Image (tube, rainbow, N blue to C red):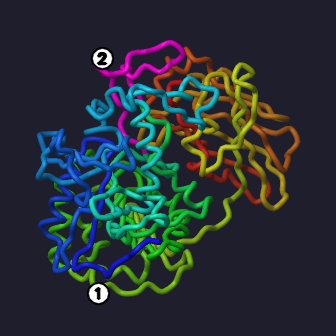
Amino acid sequence: MSVVKAAPSFFYYAMADGTSAVDSEAFGKLLDAKGGATGWRNLLDLLDQDPAEPGRLVDPKHDFLPIYKLKRAGSLAAKDPKGIACICPGGLNGLGQDAMWQSFRGGAAVDFPEFKGTSYEKLVGRHAGAELSAKFLSEFMLDPVVEVDGARKQIVSGASAGAKGTLFRASLLYMSSHGWLGGFARGDMNPGHPGALPLPTAGIVDDPRQRYLPFNAYFVVGRFDVAGRAFRGPEWIVLAQCSTLNNTTWAMWARVMARSAPQVRGILGYEEASPAAVSSIPIATSFFTHLKSKKTFYEAWKAANTGQNWAALVHEDAMGDTLDGWAARKALGGKDLSSYLGSASRAAKQVKIVDPPPPYRVRVFHKLSAAKGGSTFEITPDVLDRMRAWLLDESEYRVEITHLAGGKISQVKVQWIHIRDTFKQFDLKTIFSSHSALGASVSTKNPKVLVADLAVPATTVEVIFTAKDKNGLGASGLAPDHSYLWPRVHATGDGLADQQYDVKARGLAYNGV
């Protein structure tokens, strides 16, 4: 049975960073220095340092997880035994060249059943370590908790129910990485590392010397939402990453926040592009300066991000939360979606969160090529880091548009948006070898947009796109470490006048495989 002792006179924070960790180092240092009357401690400092590698913290329960004490060294972070503790799931600064991953687990292959049938089913060395770390991070995010049981100190996220020691949880969480409009996050691609071990062996396709981007996302908010997951500990969360707090995700986040224990008070992040790691340092400095001057978390985030694409999702009873007043924070009342307020830099005012029905239903299906088995899957907001949501060579993607009121649709337009509107957008022929619509004439006068005019208006319209072969996708210009395509649909018909619907959480991730 877990033993939870009386709350100490301080609170804990935790951090994870999948890119250059200089912004996390700055955030932690500022919180340590300006933590207010309650005082703050870094949760990861409860772990022991590795005597053989000064500056690295040891988690005996998770041998794959890089945790470092950091200081700033220019545009990157460096190990420092007296520095700021942070989980680096992609390795230090996202480079994946960590000593702990050399010949990881003696060079033995690690099985990943979620990649069954692909060359990534068995991984070795740093590739295995990075994939395991990425996979674990969602558990740490939801439940950042360390068990201290005498000399044993370990992270027990996702397994705290069986802990026998004293549990310490983070109340404030800072996560820095890349993010996408679909509501998921990843780190940097690990570049090639010629000195990586083990060397390739018979029967194992994976070569840890090659570059690698873990397929498992750090989190997918749609999966948290659909699976009924909840936070245990974090009350305020900072997502220092692009896009994961855009308004498409607000209802999903609010449901997860409301059922958490304690209930999450607020999430601060970005609706679209976020500042890079080094550029985030002055923002963190400004944020804490405003907090120290008694501004609320919400007002401090807004003021620190002037000119940025900031966003916030805050419970109405937490709008007055301050850093110095943390110990006396107000109890939260409602758990309805409307108890949470959404804000964004481009919005005229805060809005109560609602989850209204879309103007029409859009479903996206993925049919694998015959060479890959020919199976068909639906792409939903909870699977955006799974194979069913990958852009794969010669796969068929069917976009199904249905009138919700049983009326008829006479025309649809479909464009695959690359990441977001501010990015380069691609002609359909660059990515797809063919496209069609059942029962409709199709035109691509705008080479980026398919227009389907139905001879006989129908309740449901199916538009089909077939991806190019592997060489064609490789030559398309899509970046294998960052590309995400989602459908923007316009529909005309009964009660619909070229009605736009951005289906950001049913997209395709291109991983170059």
Q: Residue at x 58, y 61 (%)?
A: 225
Q: Is residue 221 left or right of residue 171?
A: right
Q: Residue at x 37, y 20 (%)?
A: 198
Residue 469: % across, % down: 62, 17
**Residue under pointer 1:** 328
Q: Is residue 378 above or below residue 510?
A: below
Secondary structure beneath label 1: helix
The single residue placed furthest to the front in the displayed view is 150
Labels 1 and 2: the sequence-earlier one: 2
Sort mark 2 into few (<14), some (14-19) or many (20+) by Cα contacts within 10 Å. few
Q: Residue at x 84, y 50 (%)?
A: 459
Segment tinted magenta in the rendering: 186-212
Q: Is residue 108 above or below residue 246?
A: above
Residue 192: % across, % down: 33, 22
Q: Mark 2 belongs to which amino acid?
A: Pro
Q: Looking at the image, which is closer to me, 289 or 30?
A: 30
Q: Mark 1 belongs to which amino acid?
A: Ala
Q: Which mark is residue 194?
A: 2
Q: Is residue 269 above or below residue 458?
A: below
Q: Is residue 500 left or right of residue 143?
A: right
Secondary structure beneath label 2: loop
